[in-house]
Image: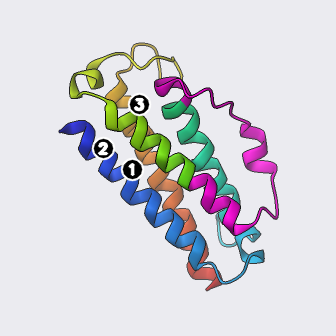
Amino acid sequence: MQTQILLDFFLRDLDKLVAEVEAMPTEESLWRVGGDVKNPVGTLALHIAGNLQHFIGAIMGGTGYVRARAREFSARDVARRDIVAALATARDVLKSVLGKMQDAQLDEPYPAEHFGENRTTFFALLTLLTHLNYHLGQVNYLRRIFA
C-alpha cells in the first residue's frame, strides 16, 4: 500500500512535468532562463529523467542505465519530443521497479550510500520525490514567465 502511494505521487508529478514541458510556447523557450531559476526547463526535465532512471532504475531495479549527469546539464536544443520521451522512459522505469516492490522493502537499507549511510529505501524514495517536486515548481515558474 505505501509503495503504491509513493508510485502514485511519482507518476502524478512526472505527468505534471510532461504537461509543463508540453505547455512551453516554443521549442526555444525550453532553453531560456528567467527570474532566479538558473537552469532552463529542458535541462530540469532531462535532469529529472536521468536522476530517476539512475537512482530507481539502475540502483534499485538493476536496469543497467548509465547516467550521464554532466550531459543532463550541458545538453541544449534537445527537441521537446525527445525530452518527453526521456520522461516517459523514466515513468516506465518507475512503474516497473516500484510496481514490483513490497512495502517491507521500504524499511531495508537503500542499496547505495548516496543518501547517507544506512538510509532506508523509504528515505531515499521520499528524497527523490521531493527533488522531483522541487524542480517541477521551478519548471512551472519558468513556464508562467514565458507563456
Say which label, 1 or 3, has the lower sequence index.
Answer: 1
Say which label, 2 or 3, has the lower sequence index.
Answer: 2
Residue at the spot 58% in from the left edge and 40% down from the top edge: 51
Instruction: Name the residue nearer the viewer: 34 or 2.
Output: 2
Give the residue at mark 1. Answer: 10
Mark 1 and mark 3 residues within 8 Å of each other at the beta carbon: no
Outermost residue to the left: 1
| Number of numbered tags placed on the structure image | 3
Q: Is residue 39 visible?
A: no
Q: Secondary structure at mark 1?
A: helix
Q: Secondary structure at mark 3?
A: helix
As for residue 86 lying within the magenta part, the answer is: yes
Q: Quadrant of residue 102?
A: top left
Magenta range: 58-87
Looking at the rendered structure, the kind of residue marked 3 is Ala
Looking at the rendered structure, the kind of residue marked 2 is Leu
Q: Position of residue 58 (x, y in %)?
A: 56, 28
Give the residue at mark 2. Answer: 6
Horizontal placement of 47 versus 8: left or right?
A: right
Q: Position of residue 99 (x, y in %)?
A: 33, 38
Mark 1 and mark 2 residues within 8 Å of each other at the beta carbon: yes
Q: CA distance from mark 2 to mark 3?
A: 11 Å
For label 2, count other residues whose C-alpha is less than 10 Å away and answer few (under 14), some (14-19) or many (20+): some
Residue at the spot 61% in from the left edge and 81% down from the top edge: 145
Give the residue at mark 3. Answer: 124
Looking at the rendered structure, the kind of residue marked 1 is Phe
Q: Quadrant of residue 21?
A: bottom right
Q: Position of residue 36 (x, y in %)?
A: 64, 65
Mark toward the viewer: 1 or 3: 1
Q: Secondary structure at mark 2?
A: helix
